[in-house]
Amino acid sequence: MSYYPLNTIPDYYLLDNLLTDEHKLIRQSVRDWVESFVMPQIDEAAQQHKDIPGLMKELGSIGALGPYIPVEYGGAGLDQISYGIIMQELERGDSAVRSAASVQSSLVMFPIYEFGSDEQKNKYLPKLANGEMIGAFGLTEPNHGSDPGSMETYYKDMGDHYLLNGAKMWITNAPLCDIAVVWAKGEDGKVRGLIVERDFDGFTTPETHNKWSLRASKTGELVFRDVKVPKENLLPKVEGLKGPLSCLNSARYGISWGVIGAAIDCYCTAVQYAKERNQFGKPIASYQLQQKKLAEFLTEITKAQLLSWQLGNLKNEHQATPAQISMAKRNNVKMAIDIARESRQILGGMGIMGEFPMMRHAANLESVITYEGTHDIHLLITGLDITGINAF
């Protein structure tokens, strides 16, 4: 259970008035699940560097996997605000939990739904939606992170199949995945997406060990050595970097909401602790320096909530631009990591203990500020949008 009462979760600008009853019901459902399933075991999972058993099926059971995918393919057919709310509640529990749902939803289910054939949609999406099948997304490579256009993973047309070679790195759920949506270059130099299944010969997923971040989730590589991919596993409706970048836009949007949850967990814990902790004869919440910190936390959380809420409206109307999504991802992740670090100081030495979430969130957010586009790259995306000049 959380250290603080859940009725203290901030809504300083009354955003609840802008949510539908369905949005609030979804939020409460996911919040209850996080309290009962995630909170009791997340510290041990992070401390022991192990994933939460049965997590994906649990996420499927609460409708957190591909919630905006139509019902006919196993999704819930929800809007983008609902997706954001779900991500926020999951990351209040832990970034690893939100990452698992985000990858499955935005990086695996989204491209299959958006760019896949009817056969691919019917074969994979229902099982991905209920967590029976776990997916991974292969774009980043050992030598190419922010520059995906220089990827070295390639496939050749062998007549009755494609032959895939290369490697992807820093892949969430790689050691657990049943399928991977892999982006590779063809002989024409164009990037296409292929669905690679676990049992394909030559496909291996070595795990990445010794992480200080996202310790409650499995990370690994996707390695392809002469992997024969059936031609029907090529995503037929997209070519070029538009495919993977559109997936990343969906994931980045979810992150902009998710990290608000991490910030809220740190903020609420800090408020509760500051009221209870007495020094020099009175609660530390009575001192100006602590009130300054708490006031700034609440201000930044409120700004982030407004940013993501309006971005969700734009997403619902199909008007959100990649640059707008980059701004929200960059701003909100920086907000969350700053609050995690500074709130740790309010707790003093207790802030490093596993009973409190600050160090865990801060460590996790070191990954979130880098993946799905680094903090600096998102800044340059905004700069390009302002000036029309590419600074990459």
Image (tube, rainbow, N blue to C red):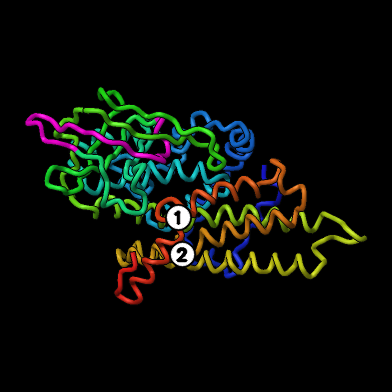
Camera-side residue of 249 and 317: 249
First to last magenta residue range: 155-176
Q: Are marks 1 and 2 in contact (CB under 8 Å)?
A: yes
Which residue sits furthest left?
Answer: 159
Q: Residues within 10 Å of mark 1 (few under 14, many from 20)?
A: many
Q: Quadrant of residue 317?
A: bottom left
Image coordinates of residue 247 in percent, x first then y, are: 32, 51
Quadrant including the C terminus: bottom left
Residue type marked 2: Trp
Helix, strand or loop status at disc 2? helix
Residue at position x 75%, y 53% in the image: 347
**Quadrant in which the N terminus is drawn:** top right
Q: Residue 321: horizontal and vertical position, in percent?
A: 32, 66
Residue visible at 31% across and 36% down? 167
Residue 164 lies within the magenta run: yes
Residue 204, position in %: x, y? 33, 27
The prevailing secondary structure element of the residues shown in magenta is strand
Q: What residue would you read off at disc 2?
A: 309
Which residue, given by chain and number where applicable, does mark 1 sit on? 84
Q: Is residue 69 magenta?
A: no
Q: Quadrant of residue 139?
A: top left
Query: Which quadrant would residue 135 be assigned to in this image?
Result: top left
> Within 10 Å of the Cα at label 2, are there few (<14), some (14-19), or many (20+) other Cα atoms?
many
Is 145 left or right of 1, judged from the image as shown?
left
How far apart are the alpha carbons under marks 1 and 2?
A: 8 Å
Q: Is 79 situated left or right of 284 in this image?
A: left
Q: Nearer the viewer, residue 263 or 175?
A: 175
* Nearer the observer, 234 or 168: 168
Residue visible at 69% across and 40% down in the picture: 354
Considering only order in the chain, which callout, 2 or 1, is on the residue closer to the N terminus? Answer: 1
